[in-house]
């Protein structure tokens, strides 16, 4: 299995297409950083809304590396699934299109092991993409903007998390984001089994994510109980929960706490179930598939 | 001992019956030709031998082992080039070969991999990406990939496809070399009779998924089974005239335009003389080996299939 995983990783990272995602993330993050460096105050005013007139806002303290990273994650974690689909959607369909799938499947390796190795390689790719995002969005922002307390806007209220209470929240958020994006990877992986070229699964994955995200965001009471709790997109943004701490009697956030850890845990379990379901289905379908490409 | 035993193999894709009740055996050391038109069921059969396609019915044994139960063990001793030799275009020849050697479970050294590439004539291009290769070079790399783990059985599906005449000749020589000097068992499919004829020891003709004829090439090319097609003005009348002669026993079939005989090649001049003596107006006379004739009858018209019985 380890050897198969090595081979799959070797193939992924020798493919030029793989690096499009890393380049795209770097470009988007740097564009946001430049914008905030030169016009960060306007963005903060937009966030605090009507409170800007009643509060004396210390813009120079608020616009720090932690805050910039939080903004970047809010903006990008919705779009990164598209980059994940590029590689995950290509994993089986790309091989079928190239004609190498028949050669691979005629080797003395079980199809189940082959699929697990391919999925594991996709998970490693997803993890590395998020590590890259963490490096460039968090570390580069810290280098450029420095560190300070972080201002979190939630439900018309503002919460301040102390700078020494932030780093672990980021680690947890990135770990959760890896799980969320692995769900997208698993979906693209499943769709990839049905296709003979990678365009189909990539476009299908993106379409499903978009439709589900719209459904997740729609404020329709009927859907709130019936559909939304079951959509994986409703749980993908649960990483934000790590930045919502418990509030003491004086209205200040309590360091080291999470307001609703149970909700995050529930979202994680649902995403794990989705991943298991998608990958299991992919393995079953692939094991029964006649390879005619 | 049979290297391959196929029993009553059937494959149905929804409503299309691609292979029907196909049985054959491949002996150890054979170069087994698998001949048929495009769409005859050759590739589907080969894909079933390689577990790419699941049979609807029937059994396959390779090296005496059940392919369904001992897949891994069997495939570790099988090398294949299936249709086009598609490989990873963004990797070099060496990287492709090394990758497939590892997947095949081979612990071959770097030096041996280079030697393998040298053997197929790619010694100068080991580090070049496959996307820069010609079709012939890709085919040779495909062969190297098939051979890298030193398999006992080699399966080549249409290996001459896309090759220039020199490439075809090289492929033929390689097949003969592997068979004669390395004692490999080879199954080679083609829609070209002369390709199969030149390399095979035994062959099978398949059409519409069914076995038409199987045997040694020598027996199928047996001159005592020459098929003679005689085009005459009135075949019915000619057949009546021949009825009271000894030639009627050689007459296989009468069509609207032809009398079809199967007889030893040396008897053709005597047949010709007899036709002249009986004042039968002969428009043309064509003699073919039975195999050639049979295969042509398949490719020309399905109606003629019955004209030949093995």
Image (tube, rainbow, N blue to C red):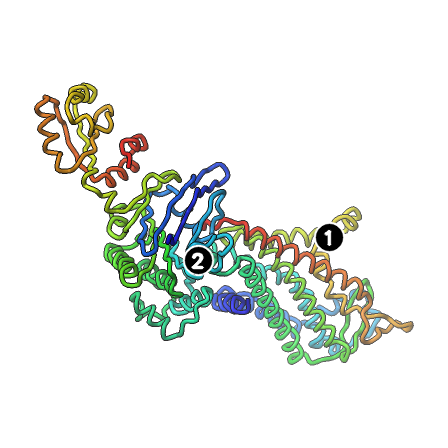
In the foreground, A230 or A276:
A276
Pick the front one: A159 or A14:
A14
Quarter of image, res A180: bottom right
Which residue sits at x=31%, y=67%? Answer: B122
Distance, label 1 to label 2, CA atoms, is: 39 Å
Q: Which residue is mark 1?
A: A230
Above or below for A184 versus B97: above
Percent across and percent down for residue A181 are 64, 62
Q: Residue at x 38, y 42 (%)?
A: B39
- Residue A231 lies left or right of residue B164; in this view the side is right
Position of B53 with respect to A226 (left or right) is: left
Which numbered disc flags the more N-terminal residue, 1 or 2? 2
Above or below residue A122? Residue B230 is above
Element marked by disc 2: helix
Q: Are marks 1 and 2 on the same chain?
A: yes
Q: Name the residue beneath numbered marker 2.
A: A103
Image side of residue A69 versus residue B270, left or right = right
User: Residue farthest to the right?
Assistant: A249
Which circle, 1 or 2, is nearer the viewer? 2
């Amino acid at each position: 299995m380890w050897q198969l995983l090595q081979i799959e990783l070797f193939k992924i990272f020798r493919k030029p297409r793989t690096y499009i995602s890393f380049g795209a993330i770097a470009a988007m993050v740097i564009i946001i950083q430049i914008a905030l460096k030169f016009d960060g105050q306007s963005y903060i005013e937009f966030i605090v809304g009507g409170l800007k007139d009643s509060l004396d806002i210390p813009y120079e303290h608020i616009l720090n590396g932690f805050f910039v990273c939080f903004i970047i994650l809010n903006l990008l974690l919705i779009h990164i699934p598209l980059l994940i689909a590029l590689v995950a959607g290509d994993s089986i369909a790309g091989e079928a299109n190239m004609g190498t799938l028949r050669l691979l499947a005629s080797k003395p390796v079980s199809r189940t092991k082959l699929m697990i190795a391919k999925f594991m390689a996709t998970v490693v790719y997803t993890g590395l993409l998020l590590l890259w995002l963490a490096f460039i969005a968090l570390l580069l922002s810290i280098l450029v903007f420095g560190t300070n307390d972080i201002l979190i806007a939630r439900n018309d209220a503002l919460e301040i998390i102390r700078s020494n209470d932030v780093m672990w929240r980021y680690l947890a958020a990135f770990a959760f984001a890896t799980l969320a994006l692995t769900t997208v990877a698993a979906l693209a992986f499943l769709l990839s089994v049905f296709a003979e070229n990678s365009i189909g699964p990539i476009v299908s994955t993106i379409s499903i994510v978009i439709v589900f995200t719209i459904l997740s965001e729609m404020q329709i009471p009927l859907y709130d109980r019936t559909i939304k709790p079951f959509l994986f997109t409703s749980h993908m943004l649960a990483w934000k929960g790590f930045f919502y701490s418990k509030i003491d009697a004086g209205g200040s956030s309590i360091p080291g706490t999470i307001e609703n850890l149970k909700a995050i845990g529930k979202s994680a379990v649902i995403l794990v179930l989705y991943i298991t379901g998608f990958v299991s289905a992919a393995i079953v379908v692939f094991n029964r598939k006649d390879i005619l490409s | 001992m049979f290297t391959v035993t196929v029993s009553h193999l059937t494959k149905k894709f929804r409503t299309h019956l691609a292979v029907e009740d196909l049985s054959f055996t491949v002996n150890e050391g054979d170069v087994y030709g698998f001949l048929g038109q495009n769409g005859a069921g050759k590739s589907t059969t080969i894909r079933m031998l390689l577990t790419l396609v699941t049979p609807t019915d029937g059994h396959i044994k390779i090296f005496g082992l059940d392919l369904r139960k001992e897949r891994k063990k069997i495939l570790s001793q099988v090398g294949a080039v299936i249709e086009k030799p598609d490989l990873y275009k963004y990797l070099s020849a060496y990287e492709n070969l090394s990758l497939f050697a590892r997947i095949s479970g081979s612990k071959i050294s770097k030096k041996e991999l280079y030697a393998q590439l040298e053997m197929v004539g790619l010694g100068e291009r080991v580090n070049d990406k496959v996307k820069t290769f010609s079709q012939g070079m890709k085919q040779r790399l495909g062969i190297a990939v098939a051979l890298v783990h030193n398999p006992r059985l080699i399966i080549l599906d249409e290996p001459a496809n896309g090759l220039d005449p020199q490439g075809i000749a090289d492929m033929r020589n390689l097949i003969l070399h592997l068979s004669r000097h390395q004692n490999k068992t080879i199954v080679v499919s083609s829609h070209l009779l002369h390709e199969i004829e030149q390399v095979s020891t035994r062959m099978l003709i398949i059409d519409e998924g069914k076995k038409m004829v199987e045997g040694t090439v020598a027996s199928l090319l047996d001159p005592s089974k020459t098929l003679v097609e005689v085009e005459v003005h009135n075949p019915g009348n000619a057949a009546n005239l021949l009825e009271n002669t000894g030639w009627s026993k050689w007459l296989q079939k009468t069509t609207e335009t032809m009398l079809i005989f199967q007889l030893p090649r040396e008897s053709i001049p005597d047949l010709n003389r007899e036709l002249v003596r009986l004042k039968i107006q002969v428009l043309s006379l064509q003699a073919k080996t039975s195999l050639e004739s049979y295969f042509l009858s398949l490719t020309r018209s399905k109606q003629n299939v019955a004209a030949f019985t093995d």
